[in-house]
Amino acid sequence: RFGRKPVLFSSIFTLSVFNIALSFAQSWAVFNVLFFMVGMGQLSIYIVLLVLGAELLVDVPRVLFSSLGLSFFYAAGMVAFPGTAYIVRNWRHLSVLMAFTLLGFLLVSESPRWLVSKGRFKEAELLLRFAALENGVEFPSDLFCSAKQPEVSGYLGLLRNTTTRSITLVVWFSLNVSWFGLSFNMTTLYGNPFLNYALLSLIDIPAHLVSWFSAKYFPRRVSFIVFSLLGLKVLLLPSEYHNITLTLVLIGKFGVLASESILQLLTGELSPTVIRNTMLSSAALFSRAGSSMFYEFLPWLTLSFLSVIGVFVSLFLPESFGKPLPDTIDQMQVIKK
């Protein structure tokens, strides 16, 4: 409704303000409320950047940004965080330091696809003419001659379509049951906790590199299924084998992270412009709901079964590899029967 750039700005503002407010928390209850707002701002920034990357970029740059660029720098921040916390030992000072986010959003333009979906053709044409000038290409004069404002569809359009329901309600949910189940059990790993954390953070980088290579050359569904099955096997690991637990957990996290990168790219490419932000936001909502499914007493077999359901449903999803990005519900591919 408001555009991609205003939401990005407001999310960064929310993250900065509540990070500063967090440093003044005097009770556990206040800390939890403020930290919830920080998490909301952080997740909003990530989702909007995914949407902007899908709509501003094309082909190879889009794959590079969605499957590697955004995730790589997220992982790099995780790796750098322990060193920063080691230098800045006071958590209140650390919280204030984290409030100083980059102002790179000022260089980000609004999405021309979103502008077209709202019927703001002149603004979209101005942005595209500037981009053509910057890249030294000729702007096609008849680009908007036959353009019409598409029908806007909100959550009802999201739930009415089989493909969007399958991705948001099943695939994202089931994948993140595996992810959160794996994450919550990392504190019980055998060995040095500092070394374990470093290894578990560093494994993010090769996972995103491999997912980018796979997304560049192979179909999305095949890549997602292979990586999901790789991450799935760690859920079946018996807890008594401490000597091989860390290695298998690293392999499991590698598979889950790589499959999540592919899923983010697939979701952005399958969803049309009119509901792309709604679809990714809803997917993130259901993925966080997956975290509530894990308890220490919940059998690993149950988590594995839910993950298998997600892999099975993904077999019937349309393939987005080499396909044009849809702008309307009508252009969206329908799930295979």
Image (tube, helix red, strand yellow):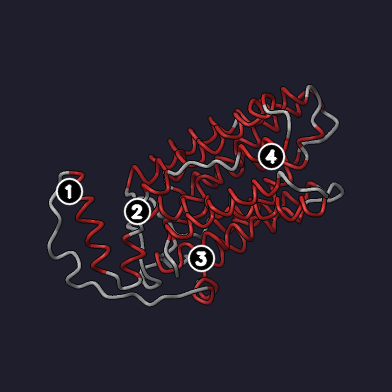
Q: Quadrant of residue 246?
A: top right
Whether tag 2 and tag 1 are in contact, CB under 8 A, the answer is no
Q: Is residue 138 left or right of residue 24?
A: left
Q: Is residue 90 above or below residue 133?
A: above
Question: Which one is earlier in the sequence, the residue at label 1 or at label 4?
Answer: 1
Residue 113's x, y, as percent? Answer: 33, 62
> Mark 1: few, some, or many residues within 10 Å (few <14, many ≥20)?
few
Q: Position of residue 116 (x, y in %)?
A: 31, 68
Residue ID for mark 2: 109
Answer yes or no: do the residues labelled 1 and 4 have beta carbons within 8 Å? no
**Rendered image: mark on residue 278:** 3
Residue at 70% across / 54% down in the picture? 36
Tell me where residue 149 sits by quadrant.
bottom left
Q: Position of residue 194 (x, y in %)?
A: 74, 24
Residue at disc 3, secondary structure: helix
Q: Residues within 10 Å of mark 2 (few under 14, many from 20)?
A: few
Alpha carbon separation for disc pair 1 and 4? 51 Å
Q: Earlier in the sequence, mark 4 or mark 2?
A: 2
In the image, what residue type sits under mark 4?
Answer: Lys
**Which of the two discs, 3 and 2, labels the residue nearer the N terminus?**
2
Q: Amino acid at mark 2?
A: Ser
Q: CA distance from mark 1 to mark 3?
A: 32 Å
The residue that disc 4 covers is 233
- Between disc 3 and disc 4, the foreground one is 3
Q: Amino acid at mark 3?
A: Thr
47 or 310: nearer the viewer: 47
The residues bearing labels 3 and 2 have C-alpha atoms spaced at a distance of: 20 Å
Identify residue for label 1.
133
